Amino acid sequence: MKHFKITPGEGLKGEIDVPGDKSISHRAIILSSLAEGRSEISGLLEGEDCLSTISVFNNMGVDISTENGNYFVEGNGLKGLEKPISSLDFGNSGTSIRLCSGILSAQDFGSTLIGDDSLSTRPMDRIVEPLSLMGADISGTKEGTLPINIEPVDSLIGIKYSLPVASAQVKSCIMFASLYAEGVSEIEETVTTRDHTETMFKQFDIPVEVSRQKKVNLIKVGKVDVVKPRNINICGDFSSASFFILAALISPNSHLIIRNVGINETRIGFLHALRHMGADIELQNKIDSFEPTADISVKSSNLKGISLNTNLVANMIDEMPAFFIAASLAEGITKVKDAKELRTKESDRLQVMSEVLEAFGVKYHLNEDGIIIHGLGEEGVFRAAEINSHGDHRIAMAGSIASLRADGESRINDCNNVSTSFPNFLDTCTKVGIKIEES
C-alpha cells in the first residue's frame, strides 16, 4: 500500500501540464469503439480508470493500440461488440460501468459487470431503474450494488425520464442506451451536470437536442444506425488541475500556470467559487474548440468564507475535497449544503473529509447533506496529521496539498488509487517545489 509524506512549504513556481480529462477520455474510448472504422485519440488519460475501460472493450473484441502516446481504436460498430468470455471488470471506474451499462443493455449477448471493492459499494439502482423502464433485462444485488447482470432483449424503447439525482453518469447511461432504442428519449435535469456526453455525441455526428425549458434542461436522443469514427484531442483535466490551483492559493509567495486545461462551463464551478472567495485566478490563451481550453494562472491569495451557491455543487462535485481545504484556510465561515451526492463517491466524502479536517485541527459542523467549516484565516496553520484517505484518490490528493500548510510533516495513507486519475501526481508536485515522497 502506498503512502505519501509531505513537508510544509511555500513559494511554489512553474508551468505544468495535467493529465488528460478523465470524463472525456472515457467517452472517447467508448464512442470510438462503437464507431465503424478507425479513430485516433491524443491526450488520453493513461490512468487506471481509463485503462479499465480499454480492457473492457478489448474483451469485447475491439482492437485498441497505442503508439507514441496516441491511441488508435478500430471501432466495431454499434452492434459489433463480441460476447466476453468472462465478467467485465471495470476496476474503480463508476463512470465507465454506468455508461457502458446503457450500451450492454442493447447487445444480443448477456454480460456480468463487476468492479473493485470500492466500486462494489456504490449505488447502481440509479441506472438499473431507467434502463429497466427502457425494456432492459438488468439487475443488481438486493442492496442495489454490483455485480450487475444483463440479459439480451429484443429491443429497447425511448423514455421520458426526470433525473432523481444530479448525475451526469445516469444521464449519459440513458443517452447511450437511447442510441439503440426505438423512438426518442427525453431526459430532464433540474440541476445542470457535466455535458461531456452531449458534446462528444455532437463531435461524432450523433444527433442530440439540448434545450432549456422552465429552469429544466431537456436532452433528446434517438436511435442511430451508424457512428462515424473521429480523431479526438483531449484537453487537461480540470479536476486534476484543481489540486494545483489549491496548492498555489494556499502556499505563500506562489505563482503557478497550468497549461491547456478544459474549462467547460459545466466543470468549473470550483473556479467560480474560489473567485467569489477572493482567489487570484486568471484564464489565459483561451481556445474555443469542441471542449474549450485555457491556461490557468494562479497566485497566492487571502480567501474569505462564503455560503456556496447550491447551483454550483453538482458542477464541482469532484473538486469538493479541494474546496473544503480552501475553506479551512479562509477567513470566516463557509457553508455547504445540497451536497449529499458526496456520500456516494469512491468514499463517503462528506464523512471522510470531516475526519481530515478534524485531524488537521479545523472546526466544522457536519450535516447530512453538507458541512459548515470555520476557517483558520490567512495566517492559519494546520496541525501536522496522519490522514486515512480510505482509498479515495481525491481525498489523498487534497490531503497532500493541505499538508503544505501544516506545522510539520504529514502522512497520507492508502494512496494507491491516485493512479486512477493522476498517475504522475508525485512528479508534478516535485516539479513545482512540493516536498512529497512515497513511503
Image (tube, helix red, strand yellow):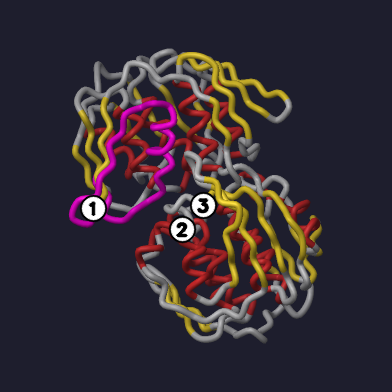
Residue 234 horizontal side relative to residue 122, left or right: right
Q: Residue at x 76, y 67 (%)?
A: 12
Q: Which residue is mark 3?
A: 263
Q: Gap between marks 2 and 1, in whole Å?
A: 20 Å
Element on which disc 1 rests: strand
Tell me where residue 79 appears, x and y as whole percent. Answer: 39, 15
Q: Which residue is mark 2?
A: 317
Residue 267 horizontal side relative to residue 167, left or right: right
Question: Which one is in front, 280 or 399?
Answer: 280
- Residues shaded magenta: 188-216
Q: Residue at x 64, y 77 (%)?
A: 360
Tell me where residue 69 appears, x and y as whole percent. Answer: 70, 30
Placement of the C terminus among the 4 image quadrants? bottom right
Tell me where residue 233 appears, x and y as whole percent. Answer: 58, 34
Q: Amino acid at mark 1?
A: Val
Q: Sequence order check: which comes first, mark 2 or mark 3?
A: 3
